[in-house]
Amino acid sequence: HLSKELTIIGVLCFGEDGIYPVLAAPTCKMEDASDMEIILALTVDQWNASSAVALVGPAWSFATDSDATQHAAGHRLFVKTLLPLDSTLYGMLINMPGLNLFTGTGEMTLNFDFKHVFKCELFFLLKSISADLYINLGICTLIRSLAGIVLNNGRVINSMMLAQYLSWLPAYDKQAVTKLLHPDDPQDVPRTVELMLAVIEFSNSQHALISDSFSVDVDTRADLTSISLLSALLQATLTPFINMNISLSQKFKHLSHYAHLVFAFFHAHRCSFMLYQLYYDTQTMVKNTFFCLAKQ
């Protein structure tokens, strides 16, 4: 086996921008979930057995970009034990109905990089992709694909619909909208965030038409209502990460809002709205955020 990539694990401390590498291992990409589970478990065990716990602190969570192998290994390691009654976290988190209270050893939780989640949610609206390729995609992937997502009792929001309506915004002509929906680099995070903000801005500009129950243009109003639902979802998940002017309490209200919205939409439309993997990733991301707050 010849290595083609490098698996790197680093430590990030709250309040610091730097990342401290603790593992760099060449990989031929032939490992399965069991192999990756051993690697992750050994890394965590070595951290806990070293002086790092006393000097830095215990590991709170493990984050990945949702690589399929790491995803499966992370689930086995960090979503396996129900939070015990005598845990210091139990009294705070038990009052949040619906929150998944399963953790790993030492109450470690699984997490997913929010930038990966954003890119994946939007990319689906631009390209038609098979489920096996989904693993590396997310919210922006969804709304950039031709297949799109289903909201509002069966309304399909895809790149064609967004291309039609985003050009209503004064700041975006047809060419600018095309660049937003079909970027040269689908992994471009700033362009992804710009698209999400454009959808939110467009929805906010159409309140009058959406609230006009006597409108004779039924199809347009149905489209705009669907986009407003998408906008609410995007705003709830994006605001906590880009708006530094709101309080911590407000950030967590947004995340809670997102978790409840995405559950309601997924319950209504299942995979037509969002594939199981992305639903798992986003809800796990929100869960980890609440766990980390409780551990402060």
Image (cartoon, grey):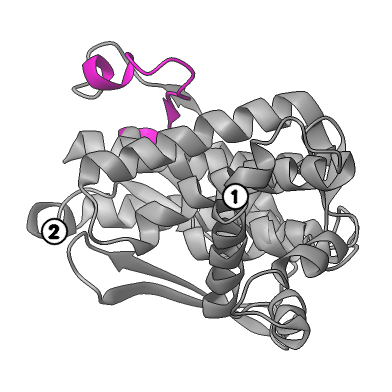
Task: Point out residue 50 in the picture as x, y percentages from the top left corner.
Answer: 20, 57
Q: Are marks 1 and 2 in contact (CB under 8 Å)?
A: no
Is residue 58 visible in the rendered image? The answer is yes
Q: Quadrant location of residue 295?
A: top left
Percent coordinates x, y for residue 139 in the rendering: 66, 56
In this orientation, which residue lies closer to the viewer: 234 or 280? 234
Q: Amino acid at mark 1?
A: Ser
In the foreground, 76 or 207? 207
Q: Earlier in the sequence, mark 1 or mark 2?
A: 2
Determine the secondary structure under disc 1: helix
Between 267 and 74, the one lying in front of the other is: 267
Q: Which mark is residue 56?
A: 2
Residue 258, horizontal then vertical, whole percent: 50, 38
- Identified by mark 2, the residue type is Val
Residue located 24% across and 52% down the image: 246
Is residue 191 a member of the stretch shown in magenta? Answer: no
Q: Is residue 207 left or right of residue 245?
A: right
Can you tell which mark lies on residue 231? Answer: 1
